[in-house]
Image (spheres, grey):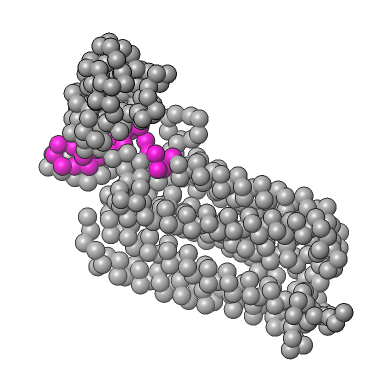
Amino acid sequence: MEERDDIIEYSLYNHHSEEEGKKQRKKIWKVTLILSIVTAVEVLFGAMVKQGSSMWLTVKVLFIVLTVIKAAYIVLTFMHLGDEKKTLKWIVLLPYLIFMIYLIFIGLTEGAALFPRM
Amino acid sequence: MSGHTSNEMKAEASWGGKASPFSVSYGKLMMWFFLVSDALTFGGFLVAFGLTRYSYGGAWPIGEETFDALPFLSGSYPLAYVALMTFILIISSVTMVLAVEAGHRMDRKGVTKWLFATIIGGLVFIGSQAWEWSHFIHGTKFGRVELSDGSIATAKGKFGEIQSFEVVRPGAHYAGVGTLITNDNITQEDGDLMHAFQHAAAKRKLTGTAGAMMITLHDGTVAKVNKEADQDLQLIVKVPGNDHAVSSAADESTRISEEEGSVSLYYEALSKGNVVYGANLDENEYGPQTYGHFFFFVTGFHGFHVSIGIILNIVIFLNVLKGTYHRRGHYEMVEKGGLYWHFVDLVWVFVFTFFYLI
């Protein structure tokens, strides 16, 4: 039977040894612990600090910072983007960041003018 | 995790053009491109959500007030349930990355075990979301009322249990003055006592004041409502009227308390039919109509992604059992499925912050 070349499964054969696996698992559990703690802190602040209190603005900024930290751990460690080639890393992150930062900027600028505040 | 992408490439690993851009396989690169586009979609939704929310000011629902219920328990547990959902999804992300790691060691047993755990985690999450949606749609016992001065308020407190309806004027189904209607003998049409009560309130078929209410049931039966008194009924004013200003989320004393007549205000609104229970696409008890739209659309779109992820994981799992990837010599398909699954977790991290926390 002729070999079909349209179903070749390309891979870089990323195998690793038992020791390397042990190191990776340790890192995975470490990140798990970090993500759990950050989530617990978020929930604690969410339940304790009321919206509109004097602390609220600080807590809101804290939520966003913690969320970005969680996102960074998921993308860089769980999705292994941190281990990919630098070029690939930036080809994924840079266009996204440019578009999103622009969108957030325009949302914040125009948001107040779009609707009358109730 | 260093090392695997810098390996010397084998000939069969290169793309059609005999090179492999970024030392990454074709499938993985395309998965990344897809995820970037999908992330832009979700980013657009969340920015639109923030924009809308900002324009509504204080009338917007507050996460810890809206999401404070747990299955099988009454009482207020702010954010506990969504925190649990978040934790479940994070854990299923961890089991996924452990499956990928096992794949790198060609450990078929390990991949099987961790991928199975991931599928279970996904199913538990989607089940939790089903409960949350159901709770959101059915709403609270008090609902949201429009008070006589035109202000709109949600209510907090312990809803006094409805014990029975006592027939005053019999209709087609409930014969005999003085008959006690309970959940045991209520007709299917009326559902249960709580359902009949809320249905009547929304249809202006509930009259009288707290403690002395009359209900008209589906068949025209008029009955007296035997109900325990509510406890600590507080009205949280969301939209101001002539007499009541908006309650501050930071200060419970700005709510209308029992001393300030919350009970009579609330039951006056009920007897006029000025009440909304739960949520649908036309109205919801939590806040503006747009809030309901965003809630259903964004969490629904995320739930749809989770469902797709579960299906992909099941397909990959079956192939692991069959040994497809073992014969192929590598478990990269688990990695690609894993990328998608982590992305679903990533989106939830943001939905959690912007829908529930802020």
Residue B139 picture location, percent across and down: 38, 39
What residue range appears in magenta?
B135-157
Could one spot residue A31 in this view of the protein?
Answer: no
Q: Residue at x 35, y 47 (%)?
A: B280
> Which sits in the foreground, A91 or B322?
B322
Q: Residue B129: within the magenta? A: no
**B335 shown above or below B148:** below
Kindly give the residue lying farthest to the bottom in the view shown. Answer: B17
Q: Is residue B222 above or below residue B342?
A: above
Q: Is residue B148 magenta?
A: yes
Q: Which residue is rendered at x = 81% and y = 58% of the image?
A: B322
Q: Is residue B146 above or below residue B215?
A: below
- Quarter that holds the N terminus of chain B: bottom right
* Image quadrant where residue B249 sits: top left
Marker count (numbered): 0
Please give left or right for residue B4 compared with residue A85 in the image.
Answer: right
B95 or B130, nearer to the observer: B130
Q: Position of residue B271 (x, y in %)?
A: 20, 30
Give the residue displayed 64% in from the left and 56% down from the top.
Answer: B311
What x and y, as percent, mark residue B260?
19, 28
Q: Nearer the viewer, residue A53 or B248?
A: B248
Asked if residue B268 lies left or right of residue B21, the reply is left
Q: In the picture shown, does residue B158 fall above or below B18?
A: above
Rendered location of residue B343, percent (x, y): 59, 62
Residue found 44% across the figure and 72% down from its top = A101
* Picture quadrant of residue B192: top left
Q: Nearer the viewer, residue A90 or B344?
A: B344
- Residue B59 visible? The answer is yes
Quick check: A8 left or right of A33? right
Residue B277 figure quarter? top left
